[in-house]
Image: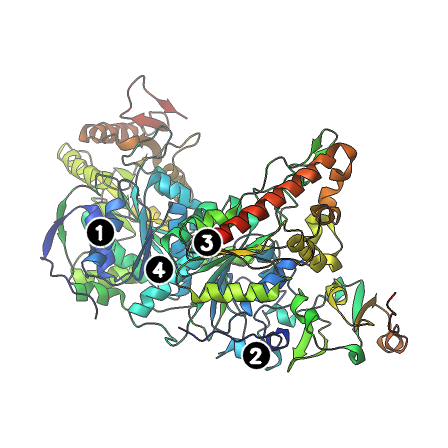
């Protein structure tokens, strides 16, 4: 097993040589890029990467440019995870057969995909990868919407959000269904590690990514990725929105080890009301009309209940 | 590459990031890498900017918040110090300014055409706590 | 070596599936990512069993769908090694998206397709609907007529596909059940001969070369896409046939078995002939011989390589023939059949421009009987005698109910 990169503090982390390049075509203020950097910089080991079709993919490999410094592949919308799984299988085959060109390396296999490519169209492929035990990590860049195609709802889109296919209107408050709990679903595949992360809490993120890279077997990471374009906020406020998402507990940070040990990894000192999180985003603007204010109250109750559930699981060590 | 014909590139639309061999990418800083013309590192998105960040070194405490939260790898940190901004890759989002904790801020956004020396000369003073 | 060789008899009694599985073992595939579907399943089961018994070394990834099977193959192939899988019918249809991606990324994956009808209505038996579905996907397509061909063509396919001047994926087609589940005598190669014929895999643009990172699967829009697709088509049109011919020649030297892009039978002086694919070629040959005893100068042209289409070679093979029947084993659904169209294209600018008629037969595994072919040759001879096509241009044969013909 390779030696883990030592990252005591941010100053030390800042000596990392990025393996993801600028002049990509992601929107100004896009959180995808921040998450990708934190994941890649968590290790100095070689990387074999994939991206499923989506914002990250179409913005980082537009011919004749690539923004990737490690080997990278994109096939389609649904199968980025399986592309990496195939590469991992080839690595194992060539290792057994003594045909690796650089046999002393310890490559990490990581697939990136949006929530559409993970929660919806790529769900089966990811489930297969997790179930089969590939030594790989799947990272969801969860912006709760099909941003690349212009803002359609996905099964990660939360109640009350206005998207182009579940818009708010004269008689509708937008999305009617609650978000799918992918971290639990993936943990239920009996994988060694499943976690939720956020780019503002970089240390928590790096710790989880490093754990995930060291552990043998498939790892699932869900990363909140505030989308300036579809959540409708000023690009400069990406980190503010990330802070609101974690500190309101809309995106609680936790991990599930071997599907039987849940740890909450971040407890906000001051828990922010969900209302503040919602108020900062254009996609929830209509919820502040009198007739929909009950939805905000329900949001808060849902978040409180989820937080309570996580706490109970942590306490019970299940 | 703009006028390359169908017979002039690698099959499969495959791209290489580097010219020749690179032994240890994670251990090699950008300035020491032999990027190929196909790495977006050699491209520029400077023309996306309406506003640009200006860095006032005197106030910087090298906390590296701007480095970690920059979505465009545009905060240049070397030996744990913030040494400048990569203006070819900065899209002018302004996150670095928002996350800068110093008082006054060490990074501020200005109109793309503003003059750095002028702005540095009239940098805001420390804000008193109310 | 961490696996054992297998001693084979000179002639083994194998069905087409097992013949293909043995070829994959002898080619020492590094990764097979696969999903079961009738009638192709025994091919990947075979590889998996060889792996379990220590007769091959590699990774078998049993995925959750055919789409994932080809996706895994693409990832594995891009990583840099020898990759193969097998499928049929609905599984093939589910794979279609990834077939285009594999060829566009120039990954030399080998896919054994055991031809089967496409639903609805659901049917497990052999016709050429899946094979035809793949014809614009940018893959090289070889057609086997019997288990021996299915065995041999796997070696030839690897040799051609993996050649650095080619780097295109290839399919080996065999007819569902008629070939895949019919045991026949198959002349074998020894393990050393088989592996020696294709040699070690030579990586190219491999993701696992950490000193030369690569980006695979980029986006190209109107400013680049056309050039890339043009390059792919150019390489299919100009580079593949010479390599296939060279592989056929080398294989003949090794085994004594001769393959041709277009397989002509009794064509030297033929007045009438049928052009067909798969197991029908062998039936047609038998009937053609019998027709000659009746005084009809009959021949058969089998197509060995469907893509790239041997346009010039087929025109050459059909030179001097007066009446030709194109046999399509796939519902054309609103058009003349694929073979009819390709032949029409190949013959239109020739001096002879023989009479061409199309026949649709054998859908969903319906037998093509010798009587069908006798009637067909007789009809062709009638055309020759009348100096014109006396029937409609498209006829269904072997279907119950009132006579179906069009055009």
Residue under label 1: C46
Task: Residue B22: give x, y in percent of width and height.
Answer: 50, 78
User: Both on one chain, marks 4 and 3?
Assistant: no
Residue under label 4: C161
Q: Which sits in the foreground, C364 or C48?
A: C48
Q: Whole-Å distance between the Cαs marked 4 and 3?
A: 54 Å
Kind of element beneath mark 4: helix
Residue under label 2: B34
Q: Whole-Å distance between the Cαs marked 3 and 1?
A: 45 Å
Ranked by sequence position, the earlier of labels 1 and 4 is 1
Residue C353 seen in this snapshot: no
Residue C300 occupies quadrant: top left
User: Both on one chain, marks 3 and 1?
Assistant: no
- Does residue C287 sit above or below B51 in this rendering? above
Q: Chain of mark 3?
A: A
Q: Which sits in the foreground, A218 or C49?
A: A218
Q: Whole-Å distance between the Cαs marked 2 and 1?
A: 47 Å
């Amino acid at each position: 097993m390779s030696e883990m990169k030592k990252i005591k503090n941010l100053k030390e982390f800042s000596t990392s040589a990025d393996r993801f390049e600028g002049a990509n075509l992601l929107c100004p203020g896009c959180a995808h890029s921040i998450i990708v950097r934190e994941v890649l910089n968590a290790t100095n080991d070689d990387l074999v990467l994939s991206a499923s079709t989506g914002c990250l993919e179409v913005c980082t490999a537009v011919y004749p440019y690539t923004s990737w410094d490690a080997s990278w592949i994109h096939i389609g919308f649904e199968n980025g995870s399986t592309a990496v799984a195939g590469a991992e299988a080839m690595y194992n085959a060539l290792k057994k057969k003594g045909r690796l060109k650089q046999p002393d390396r310890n490559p990490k296999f990581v697939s990136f995909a949006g929530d559409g490519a993970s929660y919806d169209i790529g769900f089966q492929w990811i489930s297969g990868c997790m179930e089969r035990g590939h030594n790989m990590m799947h990272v969801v860049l969860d912006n709760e919407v099909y941003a690349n195609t212009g803002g359609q709802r996905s099964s990660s889109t939360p109640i009350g959000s206005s998207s182009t296919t579940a818009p708010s209107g004269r008689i509708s408050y937008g999305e009617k269904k609650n978000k799918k709990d992918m971290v639990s679903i993936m943990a239920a595949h009996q994988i060694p590690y499943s976690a939720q992360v956020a780019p503002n809490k970089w240390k928590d993120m790096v710790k989880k990514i490093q754990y995930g890279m060291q552990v043998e077997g498939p790892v699932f990471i869900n990363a909140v990725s505030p989308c300036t374009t579809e959540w409708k906020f000023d690009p400069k406020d990406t980190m503010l929105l990330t802070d609101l998402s974690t500190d309101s507990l809309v995106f609680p940070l936790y991990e599930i080890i071997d599907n039987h040990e849940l740890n909450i990894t971040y407890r906000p000192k001051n828990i922010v009301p969900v209302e503040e999180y919602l108020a900062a985003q254009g996609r929830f603007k209509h919820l502040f009309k009198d007739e929909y204010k009950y939805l905000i109250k329900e949001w808060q109750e849902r978040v409180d209940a989820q937080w309570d559930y996580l706490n109970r699981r942590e306490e019970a060590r299940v | 590459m703009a006028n390359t014909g169908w017979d002039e590139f690698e099959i499969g639309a495959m791209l290489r990031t580097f010219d020749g061999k690179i032994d240890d990418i994670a251990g090699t800083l950008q300035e020491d890498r032999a990027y190929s013309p196909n790495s977006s590192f050699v491209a520029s998105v400077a023309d996306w900017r309406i506003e640009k960040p200006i860095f006032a070194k005197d106030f910087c405490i090298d906390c590296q918040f701007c480095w970690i939260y920059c979505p465009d790898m545009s905060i240049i940190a070397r030996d744990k110090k913030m040494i400048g901004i990569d203006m070819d890759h900065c899209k002018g989002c302004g996150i670095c300014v928002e996350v800068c904790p110093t008082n006054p801020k060490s990074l501020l956004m200005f109109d793309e055409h503003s003059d750095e020396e002028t702005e540095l000369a009239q940098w805001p003073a420390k804000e008193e706590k109310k | 070596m961490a696996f054992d060789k297998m001693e084979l008899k000179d002639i083994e009694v194998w069905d087409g599936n097992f013949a293909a599985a043995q070829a994959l073992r002898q080619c020492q595939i590094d990764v097979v990512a696969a999903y079961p579907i009738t009638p192709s399943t025994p091919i990947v089961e075979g590889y998996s069993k060889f792996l379990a018994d220590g007769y091959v070394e590699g990774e078998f990834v049993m995925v959750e769908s055919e789409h994932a099977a080809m996706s895994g193959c693409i990832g594995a192939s891009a990583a840099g090694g020898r990759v193969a899988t097998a499928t049929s019918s609905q599984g093939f249809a589910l794979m279609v998206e990834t077939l285009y991606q594999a060829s566009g990324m120039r990954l030399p994956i080998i896919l054994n397709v055991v031809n089967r009808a496409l639903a609805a209505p659901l049917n497990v038996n052999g016709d050429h609907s899946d094979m035809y579905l793949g014809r614009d996907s940018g893959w090289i397509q070889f057609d086997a007529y019997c288990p021996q061909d299915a065995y041999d063509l796997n070696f030839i396919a690897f040799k051609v596909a993996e050649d650095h001047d080619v780097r295109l994926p290839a399919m080996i087609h065999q007819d569902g059940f008629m070939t895949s589940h019919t045991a026949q005598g198959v002349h074998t190669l020894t393990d050393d001969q088989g592996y020696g014929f294709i040699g070690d895999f030579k990586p190219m643009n491999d993701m696992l070369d950490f000193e030369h990172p690569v980006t695979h699967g980029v986006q190209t829009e109107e400013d680049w896409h056309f050039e890339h697709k043009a390059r792919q088509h150019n390489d299919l049109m100009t580079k593949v046939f010479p390599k296939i011919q060279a592989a056929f020649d080398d294989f003949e030297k090794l085994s004594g078995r001769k393959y041709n892009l277009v397989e002509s039978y009794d064509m030297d002086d033929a007045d009438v002939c049928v052009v067909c694919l798969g197991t029908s070629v062998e039936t047609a040959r038998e009937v053609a011989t019998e027709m000659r005893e009746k005084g009809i100068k009959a021949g058969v042209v089998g197509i060995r390589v469907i893509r790239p289409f041997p346009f010039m070679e087929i025109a050459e093979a059909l030179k001097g023939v007066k009446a030709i029947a194109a046999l399509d084993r796939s519902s054309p659904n609103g058009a003349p059949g694929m073979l009819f169209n390709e032949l029409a294209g190949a013959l239109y600018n020739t001096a002879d421009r023989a009479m061409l008629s199309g026949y649709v037969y054998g859908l969903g595994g319906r037998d093509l009987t010798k009587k069908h072919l006798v009637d067909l040759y007789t009809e062709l001879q009638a055309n020759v005698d009348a100096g014109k096509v006396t029937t409609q241009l498209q006829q269904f044969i072997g279907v119950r109910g009132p006579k179906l013909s069009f055009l």
